[in-house]
Amino acid sequence: MPNEEATLEQRKAIGIEARKQTKRSSHHKTGNTDRDPLALLEANSEGRVTKLVPLRYARMLVSPFAFFRGSAILQAHDLAGTPDSGIQMQICGDCHLSNFGGFATPERNLLFDVNDFDETHPGPWEWDLKRLAASFAVAARHLGHGDSAAEETAYIVAESYRQKTLEYAEMGALETWYDQITFERILESAKTAEGRRLVREGMAKADRRSSEELLPKLGVMKDGVWKIRDAPPGVFHIHGNTSLFDEVDDWVQLGSPEALIKKLYKEYSGTISASHRQLLERFTLHDMAFKVVGVGSVGTRCLIALMIGSQGEPLFLQIKEARDSVLAPYVKPKTPFQHQGRRVVEGQRLMQASSDIFLGWSTGPSGRHFYLRQLRDMKVSPQVELFDSTILKGYARSCGWVLARAHARAGGLATEVAGYLGKSDSMAVAIGKYSMAYADQVERDYDIFSKACRSGRLVARTEADYTADFLV
């Protein structure tokens, strides 16, 4: 927390003093990379739905970038051995480029922000910056843009972060808290016509992404009640014929989804505001099913609840398991929250400029922790696979800006961090070097991982493999 009685110069001096203890140039080091990546990945898979772990590995096997997305545990381990400024705050914890995107505020404004907080935890701010910059280096290589462009893109992330942090350091607490990075601001900052076109396309796509648009894709009406379509392995009913749960699983032993949703809803309703609780009560639950999401989250317990309002309007709620953050064993500060769902929710509320009105947490009947939010509400993610080098650099600049705002809001320490970063690009140069060295490490780990999958040490199964099981 900032010392509010200190002057801006005194607070900036804290960052400058930290710079003397940990030189900015030292941030090129990759940390504790002498470890067994397979052992860490297997430990991270424990407690997941057993039959879905091979799907997680198959999704990670697609490319080094997909592997990077699904292996946050590895970088968390490695970062524990890197220098840091000693300035701690709430951080995202899994700040790669695919965890940024657009979504609507309750006022229906379209924002660009961080949108995944499963791993959020107090920690060194540099860890977010390093994971973000490294993700751009790995992605740039994967897209064939070459090492020079990869290092430049990582540099742009860090330099954008530095420049914006200096700006937030001059802003008051309320001004920083209210600051929102809208798509209109991103559009104004775009430096190319192609960049502006992609932003406009994203805005148009977001307008179409709603529960109303999703309902006919996921649901079907039966006897006046909406049911979610089974499409294993991505979507299936826990107690249905296409379930991927073992018969001895504690959720299966409940016998029906009613006991599960009843337990979850009781605690959850007390974690959202009274007005939003009343709004939610105007919807009736029609169905609930398991839905696999992402890369790193595959195998964790994630449900979707289909609710229908009095005039037939749908609302999809996502109920997602919250496990211990991958950062927890590797950082000095501890989360103040015993409930992992609350850890995610409170971290998101701190870092995001505006959060979902239905964001809350709950505990399942077997003691597992969950958080809840809307599944789709004008949410849109950039199609990074289609970005040329110039567009990727523009996207890097925007992500650096968003991260600077998120840190300035969550920690209130922009002045101290600005003092550490200074007026030169020394930190950005070091982060560029770190990102390239870590991209090399990711490729080495990916090679070990892919060989383990080919040899059978790890079992990887694609969506097509699972689908074939149900077609036989």
Image (cartoon, rainbow, N blue to C red):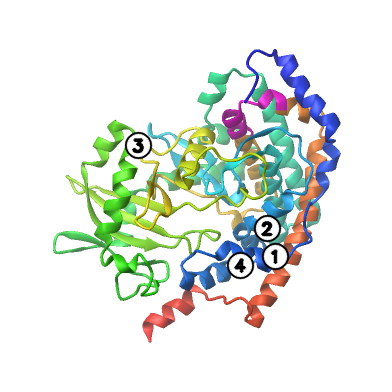
Q: Which residue is mark 3?
A: 272
Give neighbour class at mark 3: few <14, some 14-19, many 20+ (Cα, 10 Å): some
**Residue 37, labelled with which disc?**
1
SS assignment for the magenta stretch, majority: helix
Q: Are marks 2 and 1 in contact (CB under 8 Å)?
A: yes
Q: CA distance from mark 1 to mark 3?
A: 39 Å
Identify which amino acid the numbered label 3 is placed on: Ile
Question: Looking at the image, is mark 1 or mark 3 earlier in the sequence?
Answer: 1
Q: Are marks 2 and 3 in contact (CB under 8 Å)?
A: no
Q: Nearer the viewer, mark 4 or mark 2?
A: 4
Q: Quadrant of residue 368?
A: bottom left
Q: CA distance from mark 4 to mark 2?
A: 11 Å
The foreground one among 287 and 101 is 287
Magenta stretch in the rendered image: 404-416
Left or right relative to 230: residue 15: right
Q: Which residue is mark 2?
A: 74
At mark 3, the secondary structure is loop
Q: Quadrant of the C terminus?
A: bottom left
Q: Which residue is mark 4?
A: 42
Q: Quadrant of residue 342?
A: top left
Q: Residue at x 79, y 42 (%)?
A: 83
The foreground one among 299 and 148 is 299
Note whether 72 is above or below 63 in the view shown. above
